[in-house]
Image (cartoon, rainbow, N blue to C red):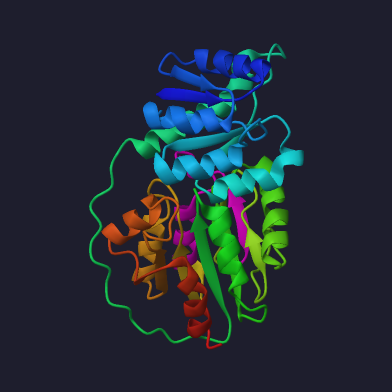
Amino acid sequence: MRVAIVNDMPMAVEALRRALAYDPAHEIIWVAGDGEEAVRRCAEDRPDVLLMDLIMPKMDGVEATRQIMASTPCAIVIVTVDREQNVHRVFEAMGYGALDVVDTPAVGAGNGREAAAPLLRKIVNIGWLIGPRGAPAKRPPVARPQGGQPQGLVAIGSSAGGPAALETLLKGLPADLPAALVLVQHVDEVFAAGMADWLATASRRPVRLARDGDRPQPGDVLLAGTNNHLRLTRDGTLTYTAEPVNEIYRPSINVFFESVARHWQGSAVGVLLTGMGRDGAQGLKAMRERGHLTIAQDQQSCAVFGMPKAAIAIDAAVEVRPLERIASRLMETFAL
């Protein structure tokens, strides 16, 4: 993988150099000391993966991410040394299309290979995502009217660009929607609690991490909160499971959607939002095959069209909608 580093701290750059050196498949093609330089260098020589700091002179990592994803998009991983202080900036950057976030590897502390492992694992996952190209999108099927039940479940999956899309969607929904919302966003468990707090503040809706044994109730907004997969069980409660171990992303959107298709007894809607790769497409198709309404975000409103495009290509989406029109469809479905 051709990797670029954007960081104004020499010690952090050295830590990233040492971490990447553990895998000879990675080549550092350039290093930028601030966001302005990164935008310019990306236009000249676009990397496969860009490791982006948040706090920098001239232009910070959030604005640099926004400009790069608008002009010369590439896979961006936010690398931060202090996630507690930077949690809001992290999810702003992810809203603009950053794929993931990881702590800066520690230099000279214990086992260097172990310290580098989280970063290297994320780069490998991104390699799987950006390697195969999805099939061309088919024309979306004609929408079918769906009858709503008094209570229900909305299963939502998102990845790159997801935080901002989730904020917009949640803001558009009334507090008395007679359905529970369960969100699966690609984010490490160390950042999940911060994302729940960020979403709650940004959307002015109560958002909390899903817990083992939770039974989704109308008004709930639950976010998958561990590196294990969230599942709905036969008795209608939520649980976390390590299986399947070969899923690239943890938590997996496919795993949750497929469990909803198997076990949810009431009315359900599957919503697949912006993201790179194909996670969620097969799960959305399973929900459609069980007769549930399934919605994919359209290309124009996506930060990254990969996941919705993959779902459309296999006829998993009953409807393809702009982000700003998904909330109104949910209200219509649940008879509000």
Q: Is residue 282 above or below residue 12?
A: below
Count of numbered circles in the view: 0
Q: Is residue 142 visible?
A: yes
Q: In screen coordinates, is 172 left or right of 254?
A: right
Of the pair 113 and 201, the residue shown nearer to us: 201
Of the pair 77 and 256, the residue shown nearer to us: 77
Q: Is residue 237 above or below residue 228?
A: below
Q: Quadrant of the N terminus?
A: top left
Quadrant of res 152: bottom right
Of the pair 21 and 82, the residue shown nearer to us: 82
Quick one: which residue is furthest to the front in this view? Answer: 58
Q: Is residue 222 above or below residue 176?
A: above
Give the magenta-colored segment's residue range: 237-262
In percent of width and height, residue 255 lies at 47, 54
In percent of width and height, residue 332 lies at 49, 84
Q: Residue at x 63, y 14 (%)?
A: 112
In percent of width and height, residue 203 lies at 67, 65
User: Is residue 51 shown in magenta?
Assistant: no
Q: Quadrant of the C terminus?
A: bottom right
